[in-house]
Amino acid sequence: MFLGHYGVAMALKRAEPKLSLGTLFLAVQLADLLWGIFVLLGWEHARIIPGYTVVTPIEFLDYPISHSLVAAVAWGIVAAAAYYSWPTRDTTRHWQAAAIVGVAVFSHYPLDVLVHVPDLPIYGDDSAKLGLGLWNNPTATNIAEFLVFGIGLGLYVTLKSHRHPVRIGRLALLAVVLVGTYLASLYGPQPSSMTTIAVSAIVFILGAAALAGWADRRATPQELQAQHLSQR
């Protein structure tokens, strides 16, 4: 899944406004970020087979460190602990924010189960593997992607935050980049190598997180004062 992960990030942002949307974008895609790194290091493996599924030509051979159920739980705990221990002046509801970061990391696995063929391990390559295989049905894949993304985007827009107001122009740019990248992955040329795919995944995930942080920038004191005056 691609768009759906970012939809979850937008929904979780409104569950805890103090969290940066950029942080949540990175959290929901941590598994894919790690996967890209591990592929480059030779720790996990995949290959390109044209027609392997209707939606993607990538056959994931082994990736228990980044994409097993046990790994999803472990990386979620690590991410939550890292966020909780990060120095911050705003300690209000800090443990709740850390828990949401952990949930965001873990959410990657169940969403991937929807679209992958049965290649997502429980704990290792010799364990049972899960996957409902929506990638073999492009219509069902697109419905799932846009439905989860649309719900998350809708929650982000409607459940407003004073500290992180909706900036329509920036949010529209973010949405265009995400949807455009998703459509390009579906209808664009087939990637030339796994190295290209891994590097592209790393660069895009980091770039999308930075763009989300910019789009969700905290309100300035002047903006907060203007909001206060407009509510009188």
Image: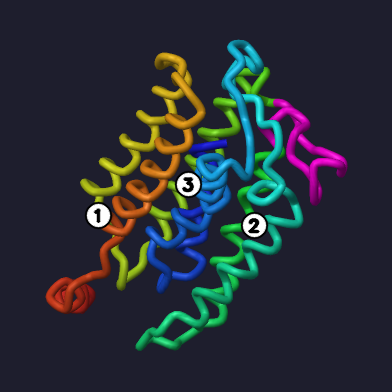
Q: Position of residue 121 (x, y in %)?
A: 78, 43
Residue for badge 3: 6
Residue 89 magenta-highlighted: no
Query: Which one is earlier in the sequence, the residue at label 1 or at label 2?
Result: 2
Q: Earlier in the sequence, mark 2 or mark 3?
A: 3
**Which amino acid does the dot numbered 1 rest on?**
Arg
User: Amino acid under label 2?
Assistant: Phe
Where residue 148 is drawn, which disc sits there?
none
- Residue with the mark numbered 1: 167
Secondary element at image label 1: loop
Give the residue drawn at x 73%, y 28%: 117
29 left or right of 65?
left
Q: Is residue 227 left or right of residue 138?
A: left
**Which residues make up the magenta segment?**
114-133
Residue 148 vertical placement versus 157 (above, below) = above
Q: Which residue is mark 2?
A: 106
Q: Main secondary structure of the magenta part?
A: loop
